[in-house]
């Protein structure tokens, strides 16, 4: 083992995990990925026990908001939630940075994912954006964990299969 200098090294602390639930969030960063037609929106928790949860964390809570024609209904839901949650705010696509600092409601849910080192892990994701008023009412159902089914969507893995006869294509 190499010689270590542990002077000034802070001991690790308990790792706190943000639970799934309904939160009032604030937008901390907006990036327009114009060639792919989406906004990358970073948020943090704005109120309550977990206020500023991601501020000092290496992890960030992001959402991708596509503004492609096929995704405009979802984009509008995000904009409507933001406008309803901030008095006198009107979205202007020419002034995207005005979104920074605005509040909105988010529904955090859990999903499984395949970790790069192998195995299945769980993470939080923003399931929906809602107005702060809707979040505070609490009548929103938080979905059960989104499980991996082990299949790649749209493809069948035949690498380990024995195929008898002609291929169907």
Image (spheres, rainbow, N blue to C red):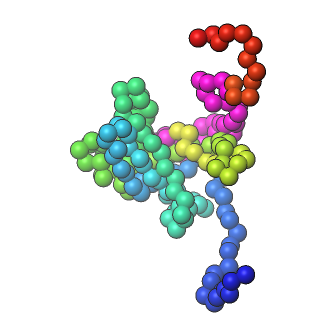
| Residue that protrudes farthest toward the front in the picture | 165
In the image, taking residue 41 as reference, residue 5 lies left or right, namely: right
Any magenta on residue 38? no
Front in this rendered view, residue 128 or 42: 42
Query: Residue at coordinates 74% horizontally, 28% vertically from top-left?
Result: 160
Residue 5, relative to residue 40: is it above or below? below
Front in this rendered view, residue 66 or 134: 66
Percent coordinates x, y for residue 64 in the rendering = 45, 42
Residue 101, relative to residue 15: is it above or below? above
Residue 72, relative to residue 165: is it above or below? below
Q: Assign the N terminus to one quadrant of the image.
A: bottom right
Query: Residue at coordinates 41% horizontally, 57% vertically from top-left?
Result: 28
In the image, taking residue 108 as reference, residue 46 lies left or right, namely: left
Q: Assign the C terminus to one quadrant of the image.
A: top right
Magenta segment boundaries in residue numbering? 129-157
Front in this rendered view, residue 101 or 43: 43
| Residue that protrudes farthest toward the left in the picture | 94
In the image, taking residue 47 as reference, residue 101 lies left or right, namely: left
Percent coordinates x, y for residue 63 in the rendering = 48, 45
Kindly tell me whether residue 98 is visible in this rendering.
yes
Query: Residue at coordinates 52% horizontally, 68% vertically from top-left?
Result: 56
Q: Main secondary structure of the magenta part?
A: loop
Residue 72, relative to residue 112: is it above or below? above
In the image, taking residue 47 as reference, residue 17 lies left or right, namely: right
Any magenta on residue 137? yes
Percent coordinates x, y for residue 114 in the rendering = 66, 44
Kindly tell me whether residue 21 is visible in this rendering.
no
Query: Residue at coordinates 63% horizontally, 56% vertically from top-left?
Result: 18
């Amino acid at each position: 083992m190499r010689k270590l200098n542990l002077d000034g090294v802070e001991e690790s602390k308990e790792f706190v995990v943000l639970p799934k639930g309904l939160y009032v969030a604030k937008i901390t960063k907006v990036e327009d990925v114009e060639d792919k037609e989406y906004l990358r929106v970073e948020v943090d928790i704005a109120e309550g026990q977990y206020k500023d949860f991601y501020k000092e964390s290496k992890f960030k809570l992001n959402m991708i908001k596509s503004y492609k024609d096929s995704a405009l209904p979802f984009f509008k839901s995000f904009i409507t939630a933001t406008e309803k949650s901030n008095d006198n705010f009107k979205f202007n696509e020419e002034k995207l940075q005005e979104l920074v600092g605005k509040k909105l409601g988010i529904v955090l849910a859990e999903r499984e994912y395949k970790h790069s080192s192998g195995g299945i892990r769980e993470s939080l994701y923003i399931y929906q954006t809602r107005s702060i008023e809707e979040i505070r009412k609490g009548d929103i159902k938080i979905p059960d964990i989104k499980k991996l089914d082990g299949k790649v969507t749209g493809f069948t893995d035949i690498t380990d299969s024995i195929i008898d006869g002609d291929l169907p294509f």
